Amino acid sequence: MAGARQAQQWLLTLLPAFPVLLLVLRLWQLSRQDMSTMLLLVQYVSPLGLLSALLIALVWAFPLGVLTFGVLGRLLRLSAPERFDPERSLLASWTARTPGWVLSAAVALGALTWQLRFLPTLLMLGLWLLALRTRYLHPDQPTRILVFAVALPLAAAVLAYSVLFAAIVAAVWEGELTTAALLAVPPAAAVLLTGPIPGWSAPVLTHGLAYTVAAVLPLVMGAVFLRVPVLPTAAVELAPQGAVAASPGGGAVPAPADRAEPVVVLGALITVTDTSTIVLDRAAGVRFLPNGRVRSQVLCPEAARVPYSVVTVHGWPVEETVLDWMMPRRPVADPDVRCDGRLPAAR
């Protein structure tokens, strides 16, 4: 059997194991490497909740992988057609078997889920794909090639710089050089890679970049997912214990715990059983809180992410996505004091 087919079979076999590995590593990290705590989390944590958190956190990775490998494969096919062998090269096999609608769906998904500062990169990848596809399918139509490989990238670059110029200047002024590069470089680069490269360098360059992306992308995905909350954060208000201690004279007097104030326990809510409310506290310790002592529970919203960049594009922060802009904003409400570990006012 050809090498590409064998590699593809191994890839399809191991690919479903990657999300499972990420989920297990997330629970292992959440339990602070304590096996008993991890087994408790596995018993009670909803698999659907974990998969939902995984999907929401890593939805951006699908367009990145599809478009990157799509550009590299089409560049190899156009630059070194004699080395484009789907039976031997996994990159060539992927390119030959990926329909155009998958690439279009990846561009649409990236436009919705990528932050604004990455949209110029998405524009660059989309224009590269369109130009390389046009050159491959219509080599005998110079007018069409001129339109899609030269005129369209130039027009897109001019339009992008007219929209992003103020933001680029602001990023440089604020010292955010990474943001400035993400906004300024891709529109100009979109004009450069719209045709073949020297055939002798195409196999080494495309395969080398493909292997690099394949090695780095899972590491980045894992680093991102390990910071995603997978359990709801809750504040549980507990009444004082009702223990009774025996006095030296034989009578019963309230124990010191009876005179104590109520307390608020903050942590990740694992589950509620018939007898206990199980919480993973901030020190990664599991606490079984008797339901008889639970006065109230409140779900604490996730803390708002502190913006890294102050740059905006016509009022649109560069760290927001189109989905963030389209979805309704959550109404601002006073936070519950119990989420700060404080008791509410006397009732």
Image (tube, rainbow, N blue to C red):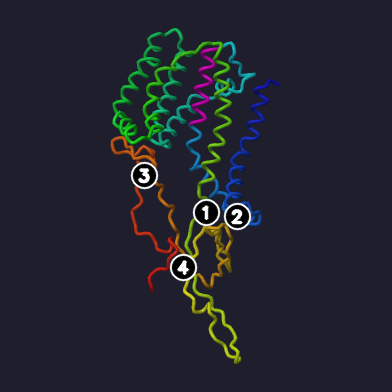
Please tell me whether mark 3 or mark 2 is closer to you in this view.
2
Secondary element under disc 3, as helix, strand or loop, is loop
Mark carried by residue 218:
none
The answer to whether residue 262 is left or right of residue 323 is right
Secondary element under disc 1, as helix, strand or loop, is loop
Q: Which residue is tagged 4?
A: 296
Residue depicted at 39% across the width and 41% down the height: 308
Which secondary structure is most common in the magenta stretch? helix
Please report contact status of discs 2 and 1: CB closer than 8 Å, yes or no: yes
Residue depicted at 64% across the width and 19% down the height: 88
Q: Position of residue 4 (x, y in %)?
A: 65, 22
Q: Is residue 118 above or below residue 235?
A: above
Q: Is residue 80 above or below residue 126?
A: above
Q: Is residue 223 above or below residue 234?
A: above
Q: Reading the chain from its start, which is encountered first: label 2 or label 1? A: 2
Please report contact status of discs 4 and 2: CB closer than 8 Å, yes or no: no
Q: Residues within 10 Å of mark 2 (few under 14, many from 20)?
A: many
The amino acid type, in three-letter code, at marker 3 is Met
**What is the CA distance from the residue labelled 1 to the residue labelled 4?**
19 Å
Q: Which residue is tagged 2?
A: 41
Q: Which residue is tagged 3?
A: 327
Q: Reading the chain from its start, which is encountered first: label 3 or label 2? A: 2
Q: Reading the chain from its start, which is encountered first: label 4 or label 3? A: 4
